[in-house]
Amino acid sequence: MISAVYDTNVLISGTFWRGAPRQLIYLARERKVQVITCHALLDELLSVLTRPAKSFHLSPTEANRVIGDVLTYARLATPSRSVDVCRDDKDNVVLACALAGQAEYIVTGDPDLLTLAVFEAIKIVTVRDFLSTVQAG
């Protein structure tokens, strides 16, 4: 089974809107993709979902339901290595999570990650490119 870290932007898009990100979540629920996450990424998801400046502005209870759903199809990894290669320091946790979980892919819409293209043999791709890869396999 193909393994991937879905960045926070992918999880949010797949949760709230139709389209390719939601298809990726369906593929994970169908066990066609093993999604890998970590506590730091789940904390970021909680923060974004409950942030007053964002349109979601979920209550902590509602946001925790979303996280609980993610945990039904994602495997938790525990990063043990610090990474410092991304031009946006906040994105280094995504790379560390992918390393810890031995992911084959990072799926993101973040240009700071996409510009890397590959990190230690982990391919960094858009939602559409990953969806094409999974459907072709």
Image (cartoon, rainbow, N blue to C red):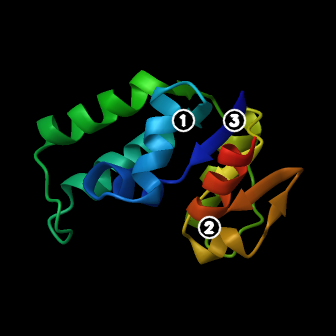
Q: Going by the image, does 28 lie left or right of 15?
A: right
Q: Quadrant of residue 8?
A: bottom left
SS category of the residue bearing label 2: helix
Q: x, y (%) of residue 17?
A: 29, 59
The answer to which of marks 2 and 1 sits earlier in the sequence is: 1
The answer to which of marks 1 and 3 sits earlier in the sequence is: 3
SS category of the residue bearing label 3: strand
Q: Looking at the picture, tell me which residue is in the foreground, 32 or 88.
A: 32
Residue at the extreme right? 121
Q: Amino acid type of disc 3?
A: Ser
Q: Which residue is mark 1?
A: 38
Residue visible at 32% across and 35% down?
67
Residue 89's tag is 2
Within 10 Å of disc 1 (Cα), the crowding (few <14, some 14-19, many 20+) is many
Residue visible at 88% across and 51% down?
120
Q: Going by the image, does 91 lie left or right of 69?
A: right
Q: Looking at the picture, tell me which residue is in the foreground, 116 or 18.
A: 18
Residue visible at 14% across and 65% down?
52
Q: What's the CA distance linking mark 1 and mark 3?
A: 14 Å
Q: Quadrant of residue 49?
A: bottom left
SS category of the residue bearing label 1: loop
Q: x, y (%) of residue 115?
A: 73, 76
Quarter of the image with the C terminus in it: top right
Whether the residues at callouts 2 and 1 have beta carbons within 8 Å, the answer is no
Q: What's the CA distance linking mark 2 and mark 1?
A: 17 Å
The mark total stands at: 3
Residue 3's tag is 3
The reply to whether residue 111 is in sight is yes
Q: Amino acid type of disc 2?
A: Asp
Quarter of the image with the N terminus in it: top right
Q: What's the CA distance linking mark 3 and mark 2?
A: 24 Å
